[in-house]
Image (cartoon, grey):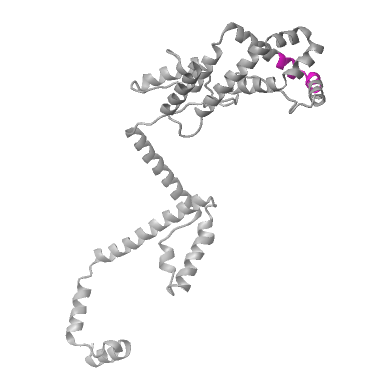
Amino acid sequence: MKPSRMKEHLMKIHPDKADKERSFFQALKEKHGRRVISSLFARATSQNDSGLIASYNISLLIAKCGQSFTIGEKLVILVIKEVISTVMERDPTQVLKSIPLSNDTVARRINEMGADTEEQLCAILRDSPFSLQLDETTTSDNNADGLYGAPSMVGRFRGFTALLKEEVPHVLTVHCVLHRHNLVAKCISPVLHESLNIAVKAINKIKAHALNDRLFRQLCQENEETFERLLLHTEVRWLSKGNCLASFCELFGSIVEYLEKVDAALGERVSSSRCDIMYLTDFFEKMNEATLKLQGKDVTLVQCKAVIHSLTSRLDL
């Protein structure tokens, strides 16, 4: 190229460099000479990696917000484009090309992150000791956690703990403190047990038939009782005995009066067992207080033992 043409190009296209010295252009030549294909690809790869990270982060935000996957290309892309073009005053084309946010892409990103999280959790659980709590259920069609009762849980041969120890021999099992508590509550004297059965029969006599229940509620209204409904006793819930007997004692006079009309023999048995029923009410009230302290979030075995020890100490007094 002719020197005159080169000088004309310099003056018209690069006027800011027209007065530069020769050393400036030599340094510029060396700088461009050091640029190789690998460095150009490295820069492009770095941009693509940043766009890939942004795509994963945006997909995570979409999953946390519970929005549909299409919001990425319908809203997020438009927001990014507006911010870059308006605030940064740059061309957003290259940036948007490096951040794929289509519906399928967002779904794939979320599935990959979910699988990675599950894999990390499994790795942590394999290397760390942890506790597993198994609860009973009252749902008849629930097969996942439908175990209930001591034999199916702690049986020596076919119970859950026996099968678990075959796979994990060093596992430590602790039976439900509440279940032990309930089993102990059943081991009362024959006289008290008979009195408890009499109270349960009286309640069932009234609650089992709609007519009896309605007539009993009318009697409670006439006697100006605080409430007029009895609670049924059930073996499923630990607090049933205490709550059942508490309501029974509150309405004791009305119960005896009503039973004398519909079943005199049962009414007489209830009257003769008054002292035992009152004693059982106080006893199960204390048991219920301890039982409630044994339940709740983050309750440890040490705390449960402390509650049981406190209860036994008071009973000894």
Choose between 111 and 214: the one closer to the eye: 214
For the N terminus, the image quarter is: bottom left
| Residue lying farthest to the front in this orientation | 317
Q: Does the magenta stretch include residue 210?
A: yes
Q: Quick check: 304 left or right of 289?
A: left
Label tally: 0
Predominant SS along the magenta part: helix
Residue at 41% x, 58% y is 54
State which region is magenta. 202-214
Residue 39: say if magenta.
Answer: no
Instruction: Residue at 46%, 31% (x, y): give it.
Output: 299
- In this orientation, does residue 208 appear? no
Image check: 232 left or right of 52? right
Percent position of residue 194, x then y: 63, 8
User: In the image shown, does 255 or 121 lie closer to the viewer?
Assistant: 255
Image: 96 above or below 194: below
Q: As rendered, which of 265 and 314 lies closer to the eye?
A: 314
Q: Is residue 115 left or right of residue 183?
A: left
For residue 272, what is the image quadrant? top right
Q: In which quarter of the image is residue 94?
A: bottom left
Q: Where is residue 142 in the image (x, y as percent from the top left)?
A: 57, 26
Q: Where is residue 169 in the image (x, y as percent from the top left)?
A: 34, 20
Q: In which quarter of the image is residue 74?
A: bottom right
Q: Is 168 situated left or right of 76 in this image?
A: left
* Residue 305 in view: yes
Q: Camera-side residue: 220 or 56? A: 220
Above or below 296: residue 181: above
